[in-house]
């Protein structure tokens, strides 16, 4: 019973952390892509996050934030955010200069240009980053459940392995994989729905 | 050559334009008038600052100093009185033809049904009926530029700025475009400013050809091919005056081409 509740809790946990990652990641990435100063200030953090070996950082995080939810959310963020942020900022910065210039020539405001030109132009790469980020987030979630305190799926895996209950262990592993695949598929559908034509190459190339 | 500037109604007047790119002086003390309702070509060797001047007039590039009047108002930035046609088309790859043409109107805040109706009209005018739902990657280079032209026409600006619009299309399409542009210039009461590096093209379509010479760029000569303007599109290319002017321009330009 408590195991089921735990599992549900972990599931919600992963999902909400993923959505935090997604919105915050795209927001920060957009800001980095648009502003050189913000880039200088913030992007080194994400480069470090991306390169740092997470397993080595976990003891440090536990020392600072304890063994509770905070540490686990941070682990998921460290896994997922850098790819999302760095992909978004790269895509934003690589928006073809001529369509931005076109936006200025036809009297677009700054907001018009961001919403109607830069974001749609960057969306294929942003979504590629999201897919990578979301899968990395799942890895982070399982890692935190295994390495920090056994909860949720991580707990089921460790516990059932320790008592040699392999069917349960395999079921837990399979369920987390299925969940991740479903999540990624929903993301792909959303991308298709939102930006039908964006997968096409640039007309000027 | 500019003694009678006050007698002619100019859509755009350009005075004292200076523009530097770092150490390189691109434009120095440039002076040029664009008479209303006429087509003026900016012609010169590559890298001579034709496009720079056009983008300064469009308000897309700041000059180091300039006195530019558009409809007798000092230039402050991009404005609804000018529309730009881009060399590389600058179409939105995720939007179909209809949405691309209507994009300028969308940025001006025109309601959807109205802007799509206007866009439809101009899509028809440039000969793209039936392609409204196509995406840019499904069109040929010439058709893409027609979309760019329709977008610029649909905002109904008085001045059309064309930045080497035909340089990315093939030779045959280009000839057709030149004839269409001539037709457009005669029928629409607009002022055209046309950047090109093709001598024949400039002489063929222009009321006035401004010859720019390279770095720092200034207007070296203004040629007004008048004798054959009333002729039909087909016979201009055989006109002796047309041929003379082409030869004369090449004689002045050839020393500047490496």
Image (tube, coloured by chain):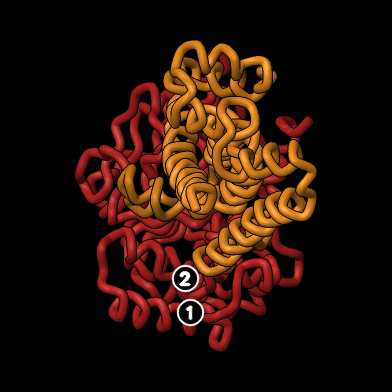
Chain colours: A orange, B red
Q: Nearer the viewer, residue B55 or A21?
A: A21
Name the residue that disc number 2 marks. B150
Q: Nearer the viewer, residue B140 or A95?
A: A95
How packed mark 2 is, by other alpha carbons closer than 10 Å (few <14, some 14-19, many 20 or more), is many
Residue B151 position within the rendered picture, expressed as x and y whole percent measured from the top left: 44, 66
Answer above or below: position of B96 versus A175: below
Q: Whole-Å distance between the Cαs marked 1 and 2?
A: 6 Å
Residue B195 position within the rendered picture, expressed as x and y whole percent measured from the top left: 55, 49
Q: Earlier in the sequence, mark 1 or mark 2?
A: 1
Answer above or below: position of A162 versus B9: above
- Residue at disc 1, secondary structure: helix
Q: Nearer the viewer, residue B15 or B177?
A: B177
Q: Say whether residue B175 is visible.
A: no
- Residue at disc 2, secondary structure: helix
Name the residue that disc number 1 marks. B123
Instruction: Using residue B200 as the reference point, say whether residue B65 is left or right of it.
Output: left
Residue at the image point whose x is 76% and y is 65% from the top: B171
Answer above or below: position of B131 versus B24: below
Where residue A89 sits, quadrant-wise, is top right
Answer above or below: position of A57 versus A123: above
Q: Chain of mark 1?
A: B
């Amino acid at each position: 019973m408590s195991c089921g509740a735990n599992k549900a809790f972990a599931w919600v946990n992963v999902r909400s952390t993923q959505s935090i990652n997604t919105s915050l990641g795209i927001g920060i990435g957009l800001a980095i892509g648009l502003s050189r100063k913000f880039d200088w200030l913030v992007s080194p953090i994400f480069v470090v996050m991306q390169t740092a070996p997470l397993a080595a950082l976990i003891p440090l995080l536990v020392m600072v934030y304890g063994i509770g939810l905070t540490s686990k959310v941070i682990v998921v963020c460290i896994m997922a955010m850098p790819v999302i942020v760095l992909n978004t900022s790269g895509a934003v910065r690589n928006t073809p200069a001529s369509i931005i210039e076109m936006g200025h020539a036809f009297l677009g405001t700054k907001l018009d240009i961001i919403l109607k030109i830069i974001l749609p132009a960057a969306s294929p790469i942003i979504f590629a980053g999201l897919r990578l980020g979301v899968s990395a987030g799942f890895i982070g979630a399982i890692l935190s459940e295994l390495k920090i305190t056994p909860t949720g799926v991580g707990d089921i895996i460790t516990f059932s392995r320790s008592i040699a209950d392999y069917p349960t262990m395999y079921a837990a592993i399979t369920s987390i994989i299925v969940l991740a695949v479903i999540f990624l598929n929903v993301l792909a559908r959303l991308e298709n729905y939102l930006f039908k034509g964006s997968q096409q190459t640039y007309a000027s190339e | 050559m500019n003694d009678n500037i006050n007698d002619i109604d100019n859509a755009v007047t350009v005075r004292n334009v200076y523009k530097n790119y770092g150490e390189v002086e691109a434009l120095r003390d440039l002076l040029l008038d664009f008479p209303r309702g006429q087509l003026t070509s900016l012609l010169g060797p590559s890298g001579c600052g034709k496009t720079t001047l056009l983008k300064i007039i469009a308000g897309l590039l700041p000059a180091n100093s300039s006195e530019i009047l558009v409809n007798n108002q000092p230039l402050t930035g991009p404005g609804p009185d000018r529309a730009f046609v881009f060399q590389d088309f600058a179409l939105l790859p995720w939007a179909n033809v209809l949405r691309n043409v209507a994009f300028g109107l969308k940025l001006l805040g025109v309601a959807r049904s109205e802007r799509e109706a206007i866009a439809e009209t101009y899509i028809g005018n440039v000969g793209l009926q039936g392609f409204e739902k196509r995406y840019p990657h499904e069109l040929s280079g010439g058709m893409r530029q027609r979309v760019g032209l329709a977008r610029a026409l649909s905002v109904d600006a008085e001045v059309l700025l064309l930045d080497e619009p035909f340089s990315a299309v093939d030779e045959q399409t280009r000839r057709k475009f030149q004839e269409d542009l001539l037709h457009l210039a005669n029928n629409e009461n607009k002022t055209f400013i046309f950047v090109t590096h093709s001598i024949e093209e400039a002489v063929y379509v222009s009321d006035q050809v401004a010859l720019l010479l390279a770095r720092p760029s200034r207007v070296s000569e203004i040629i007004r091919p008048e004798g054959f303007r009333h002729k039909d599109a087909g016979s201009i290319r055989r006109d002796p005056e047309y041929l003379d002017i082409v030869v004369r321009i090449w004689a002045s330009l050839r020393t500047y081409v490496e």
